[in-house]
Structures are given as structure tokens and as C-alpha cells.
């Protein structure tokens, strides 16, 4: 069949093409070169408060948490608890949060919230202990590598639970009250230690957790559980002994200060040759970090409620090796790669905990850093300056590390996906601005 000819002067029109919708997103824009000077205050610890919120499930009634940071992860966890039947109220200016737990909470934590934060797995132990079963979607959170749940599962099974994975959920059940047991962790996992603690405080008999994590956040959750009536010995050591009780009571607890926020500010002061006082911080929780910063040439004064970090020149490079607490924290490893990238000399950074932490290096290279990785080692050769560029935050700590790099880079550094930073740092840009940084948050389209 012949195609019909156009009528008159009309031309055949091409088929309509649908417009590609624009995606609007926030970015951080940092103009480098400022020297940070001033005073900041560390919030309550993100890595503690989320677990304390889960621990509230262990007692019927109203538990009050204080020094709760205004961060996205708290918002996510609060919504998760609401879906479990709790009444959650926040007073953000007062930094308080109340959780009214029903007699029988719901036992299912769905994927749409669980995928947003890894800490959601910590409702597994409390729900199993309280409800007899827990259905928790396999968690998401930061993209920093494999963080298997084998130790959580093995430990709960030793306490008498049955655990299986089905349709994207981890399903744990018990036919009777959990029973105390001796659990040896292959690795001092913070998450596994926390889940087993919260399951065993209501178990029958004595539970011993050997090779337990010793982080300040573990001590914090033990302190809260003890105030609820739990019997825990060996707090702060690698062996925790828990004598189960039949019932726990709601409590009022103040969250430990966030050592990682405090550590971020300490590194920022050194990188910018600044003078920053960090309040509401425990220097003892950052002993190895502050020692490393002293090696760079910084001067550190320990104060009754924090510490002051002063630097007057380009830092010297320092080697670091990440290890479980009290070793060097993996969460501050990106910060020290950023520091070493502008330091005098070369340094070796060894990552022993999360194999994907070095994905952050690709973004540092975009800023001009000289970093070469080989397995779990990164060789960082310091340069006198970095150059601003668009980069992407893949997780909370990588995002913070990029902010620090942007502070010392020439020109403008644009950080995409800053919501990761919002998950762990309250009012970060406001504090940076008060300390002299040139940083803004603005919305852009994906075609800008």
C-alpha cells in the first residue's frame, strides 16, 4: 500500500515525545579556604540512640530518652516504632523523645522503613523476647560492604529461638521463654552484641556473651537496661554476663555524647589549621583519635565537658589501622583519608572492618587527592591543595569526609546525596557556618 501524500502545505508530524521529568534534589556547596574557629556541641550519639529506642520495646509504658539528636535516622526509627504500635512523641528543641510501648507490640517491621537504616535490625531481639516472634525485613542503610547477620542468628538460636529467612524477612520465633546460654562471638560485632543483650535480659537463667563489643554505645545500652531492671555484669569488658529477669520497667535515660561527631570536628579543626572547642564530648572515648591528631602537629586540651583542638600549620601525615573499640574507629577512616590527602608526607590507611569503605576514595580522587588502594590498604600521598569538584556522598561518614575535603579545596565543591550526612549530623551546615565556613544547601535539578 502506498503512503498517502501530505495534504496542502502540511507536513507529516513526528510522533510526540514525552518530556523527561526533572528530579529536584538538594546539594551542599562548599567554598574552600576558611579557617574554622569557634565552639560546637556534640549531640547524643546516633549509634546509641537508635538502639536505645529499640530497647524501649522491652518494657510496657513510657520510656523517656534525652539528648536525642535531630537527625533523619531518629525520624525513621520513630516511625518504625509507631508501626509496631508505640506512641512516639518528640520535643526537638528539648532533645527529648518519649516512647509509650503497648502491652503487646506488633511484631513485623516492614521493608519500606527497614531499608533506610541498618539499626532497624535491633528490634529483632526485643520483639522476640517480648512477643515470642519477630518479622524484620532484611535491613539497608549505608553502602559500606557486607555486614552479615550470622552472629545475630547463631546467638539467638543458642538462646532457644528458631530463625529463618523468608521472602526478604528474617523471622525469629520461640515456643517458650528464651533460655540463657554461653555465646561466643567470632568477631566483637556491635549489632550482634546489642541484639543478644536485648534478647537475653528477659531470658530464663544466665547468658554469657564472650568477645562482646566494648564501644561506649554498648556501655550506654547496658546502663539503660540496668536502669530498667536488667542484671548485667562486666559492662565495658569483652565478657558480659546477663541474669535474666521476668519483667523490665520503663525508664528515663540520657544518651551518651556522639564521639564520631566530636571526632569529625576535631579533624576539621586540624585540616583547616583552625581552633575549635567541642563541648558535650568525652575525650576518653576518642583516645586513639586524639593521639593521632597530636601526631599531625595539633595541640589538644582536654576540658571537663569536652576538648579544644588547635592547629597552626599544614598537618603531618599519620598512618591508621581501623579496629574494634578501643582501636581506631572505622567511622572516622574517611576523615583521616581526607586529612592525609592534604598533609605533609605519605600515610598508609588500613581498613580491617568494612571492605567497601574505600569506595569513598573515588570521590576524593575527583577532588585531586593522590590515593592508591590495594585490598584493605590505601596509600595516601599528601598534596598542598585539593580542587573543588562535584562529588557524591555514598554513606554518612564518607559524606562527612567529603565535607572536610571541600573545606580545604580551592573553588567550590558540590556534594550530591547529602541526605546521608543528614542521617548522622544535626545542624552540620549551621555549625560550619558559625565557625567560619562558606557552605550552603540548595536545590538543583538533575539536568543542572
Image (tube, helix red, strand yellow):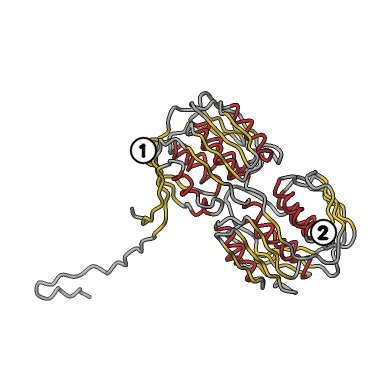
x and y, in percent, of residue 403 in the image = 47, 43
- Closest to the observer: 134 or 309? 309
Instruction: Answer above or below: position of 339 versus 420.
Output: above
Query: Where, by quadrant of the figure, is residue 122 drawn?
Result: bottom right
Residue found farthest to the left = 8
Q: How many numbered circles are shown?
A: 2
The residue tagged 2 is: 230
Point 73% across, 54% down: residue: 221
Q: Residues within 10 Å of mark 1 (few under 14, many from 20)?
A: some
Quarter of the rendering occupied by the N terminus: bottom left
- Look at discs 1 and 2 and give the one toward the viewer: 2
Residue found farthest to the right = 205
- Closest to the observer: 272 or 171? 272
Q: Which mark is residue 411?
A: 1
Q: Residues within 10 Å of mark 2 (few under 14, many from 20)?
A: many
Q: Secondary structure at mark 2?
A: loop
Point 9% across, 75% down: residue: 8
For marks 1 and 2 on the same chain, the one whose residue lies earlier in the sequence: 2
- Closest to the observer: 316 or 39? 39
x and y, in percent, of residue 159 in the image = 84, 59
| Relative to 281, 245 lies left or right | right
Residue found farthest to the front = 304
| Relative to 338, 231 lies left or right | right
x and y, in percent, of residue 294 in the image = 60, 28
Distance of label 1 from label 2 (alpha carbons): 54 Å
Q: Secondary structure at mark 1?
A: loop
Point 70% across, 70% down: residue: 101
Amino acid at each position: 500500500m502506498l503512503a498517502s501524500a501530505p495534504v496542502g502545505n502540511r507536513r507529516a508530524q513526528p510522533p510526540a515525545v514525552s518530556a523527561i521529568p526533572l528530579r529536584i534534589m538538594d546539594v551542599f556547596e562548599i567554598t574552600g579556604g576558611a579557617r574554622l574557629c569557634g565552639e560546637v556541641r556534640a549531640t547524643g550519639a546516633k549509634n546509641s540512640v537508635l538502639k536505645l529506642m529499640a530497647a524501649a520495646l522491652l518494657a510496657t509504658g513510657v520510656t523517656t530518652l534525652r539528648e536525642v539528636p535531630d537527625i533523619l535516622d531518629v525520624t525513621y526509627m520513630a516511625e518504625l516504632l509507631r508501626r509496631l504500635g508505640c506512641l512516639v512523641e518528640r520535643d526537638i528543641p528539648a532533645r527529648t523523645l518519649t516512647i509509650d510501648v503497648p502491652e503487646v507490640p506488633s511484631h513485623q517491621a516492614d521493608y519500606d522503613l527497614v531499608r533506610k537504616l541498618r539499626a532497624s535490625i535491633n528490634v529483632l531481639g526485643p520483639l522476640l523476647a517480648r512477643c515470642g516472634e519477630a518479622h524484620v525485613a532484611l535491613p539497608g542503610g549505608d553502602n559500606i560492604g557486607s555486614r552479615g547477620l550470622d552472629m545475630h542468628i547463631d546467638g539467638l538460636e543458642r538462646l532457644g529461638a528458631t530463625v529463618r529467612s523468608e521472602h526478604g524477612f528474617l523471622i525469629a520465633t520461640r515456643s517458650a521463654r528464651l533460655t540463657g546460654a554461653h555465646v561466643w562471638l567470632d568477631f566483637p560485632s556491635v549489632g550482634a552484641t546489642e541484639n543478644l543483650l536485648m534478647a537475653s535480659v528477659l531470658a530464663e537463667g544466665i547468658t554469657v556473651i564472650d568477645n562482646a563489643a566494648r564501644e561506649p554505645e554498648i556501655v550506654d545500652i547496658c546502663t539503660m537496661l540496668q536502669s530498667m531492671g536488667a542484671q548485667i555484669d562486666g559492662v565495658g569488658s569483652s565478657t558480659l554476663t546477663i541474669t535474666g529477669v521476668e519483667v523490665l520497667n520503663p525508664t528515663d535515660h540520657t544518651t551518651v555524647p556522639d564521639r564520631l561527631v566530636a571526632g569529625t570536628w576535631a579533624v576539621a579543626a586540624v585540616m583547616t589549621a583552625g581552633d575549635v572547642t567541642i563541648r558535650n564530648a568525652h575525650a576518653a572515648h576518642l583516645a586513639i583519635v586524639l593521639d593521632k591528631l597530636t601526631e599531625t602537629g595539633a595541640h589538644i586540651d582536654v576540658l571537663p565537658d569536652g576538648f579544644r583542638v588547635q592547629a597552626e600549620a599544614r598537618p603531618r601525615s599519620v598512618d591508621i589501622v581501623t579496629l574494634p573499640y578501643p582501636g581506631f574507629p572505622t567511622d572516622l577512616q574517611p576523615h583521616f583519608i581526607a586529612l592525609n590527602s592534604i598533609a605533609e608526607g605519605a600515610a598508609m590507611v588500613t581498613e580491617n572492618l568494612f571492605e567497601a569503605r574505600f569506595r569513598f576514595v573515588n570521590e576524593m580522587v575527583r577532588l585531586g587527592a593522590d590515593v592508591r588502594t590495594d585490598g584493605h590498604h590505601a596509600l595516601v600521598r599528601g598534596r598542598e591543595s585539593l580542587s573543588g569538584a562535584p562529588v557524591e556522598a555514598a554513606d554518612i561518614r564518607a559524606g562527612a569526609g567529603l565535607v572536610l575535603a571541600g573545606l580545604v579545596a580551592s573553588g567550590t565543591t558540590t556534594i550530591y546525596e547529602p541526605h546521608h550526612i543528614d542521617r548522622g549530623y544535626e545542624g552540620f551546615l549551621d555549625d560550619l557556618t558559625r565557625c567560619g565556613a562558606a557552605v550552603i544547601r540548595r536545590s538543583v535539578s538533575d539536568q543542572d
